[in-house]
Image (cartoon, helix red, strand yellow):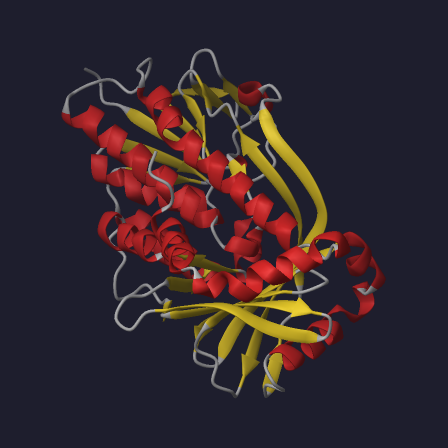
Amino acid sequence: MNEQKICIIGDGLAGLSTATALSEAKIKIDLYTSNNQKNKILNDNRITAISESSYQFIKKKMNIKNNFLVWSCKEISLYFEDKKNIKNFLNFKEDKKNLMHIFQNKKFKKILKKKILDKKNIRLIKKKITNINFKEGLVLIDKKIFYYDLIILCTGVHSKFYDQITHGRFIEKNYNEVALSTIVEHESKITKASQFFLKEGPLAILPFNKNSFSVVWSVNNSFFNKNKKFLKNSLVLKIKLLLNNIKIKKVENIQSFPIKLNLKTKYFKNNILILGDGLHMVHPLAGQGFNLVLRDIKKLGELILKSSNLGLPLKNSFLLEHFSQSRKPENIILGLGIDLTHTFFKDRKYILPFKKIILNNISNFKFVKKISKIISNKGISI
């Protein structure tokens, strides 16, 4: 059998993670990246949170250990706003285990790229792919044709190539919201992660070292447009209110991202697969987005390694069908579950009395905490 080759398009978190994890199968991988990524990476202040099981996968399959700078968190607190009061309704705490690991995207990307450059079976190619032939499984670059046994699209939320795979088969919802993201440097003691369900929208505090944390605040479009010129002041006032007049040294420029729900129901066509944010985009309130991506990569890696060890071809096989059947149920159920959580916490007067009853008593139901911790850590096994 001829030597098999995989093409990965896109060098965001999903593309770099996929290339690093799949290199274990000893199959040749071409990772295509555009030439204009450097400034985007330098200006990217986003933070990502992953579960303990996802972190163990990164350590084992991607061989990222002590040099991977993470903030390991053993405590998470949840709050909701009732009139002018902020009430703590649920706490998760571990003495020995970690509940969450938090890292800066740009540092993680830098580490992954360094590892990829050291891999003999991965080529990093700075070329723009102008077209893909879905029938033949080939890519076109500068009028040259390249054939691959598997093509993986890690090209973000929007891509002209997705339509040829999905044909409009997806679950979509426009939240009419914007995620505001920034980094806050401080002189206070902030060690735990916090999620505040506020009238304006959910706000997360994610520490990634002893003097810095990330803020992700989801607000509706009308609030965003009305306060566009004063976003930093509004955010600082809100943080000081929530964290008891914390001593803030610096707040970086605020980045904004539109929020939508998009769950693909068609994952592949022939030997071409969608992976990453293009496969499932969920609301950031639960911090599960990249966990879903890593679970997809883990399953795909298992299937490719198994096929490789058995000497089976990747192209024209049932591998992508097996991957889709394995991952689609959890991705859709969790995506819709996060959407339901978002709906529950929205500021709506007619459900407020029921919401208050539930939240004031939820800590008494230990099975709720147990199930929540399992799902947040390992997802749903179906």
**Residue shown at 25%/17% (left/top)?**
313
Total count of labels: 0
31, above or below 213, in the image? above
Q: Nearer the viewer, residue 214 or 28?
A: 214
**Residue shown at 33%/38% (left/top)?**
381
37, above or below 380, in the image? below
Q: Residue furthest right?
A: 226
The x, y position of residue 305, in whole percent, is 21, 31
Q: What is the quadrant of the C terminus in the image? A: top left
Is residue 348 rendered to the left or right of residue 282?
right
Residue 325 visible somewhere in the drawing: yes
The x, y position of residue 318, in whole percent, is 31, 16
**Residue shown at 63%/51% (left/top)?**
344
Residue 44 visible somewhere in the drawing: no
The x, y position of residue 346, in whole percent, is 68, 54
Q: Nearer the viewer, residue 288 or 340?
A: 340
342, above or below 196, in the image? above
**Residue shown at 15%/22% (left/top)?**
310
Q: What is the quadrant of the N terminus in the image? A: top left
The x, y position of residue 92, in whole percent, is 41, 67
189, above or below 129, in the image? below
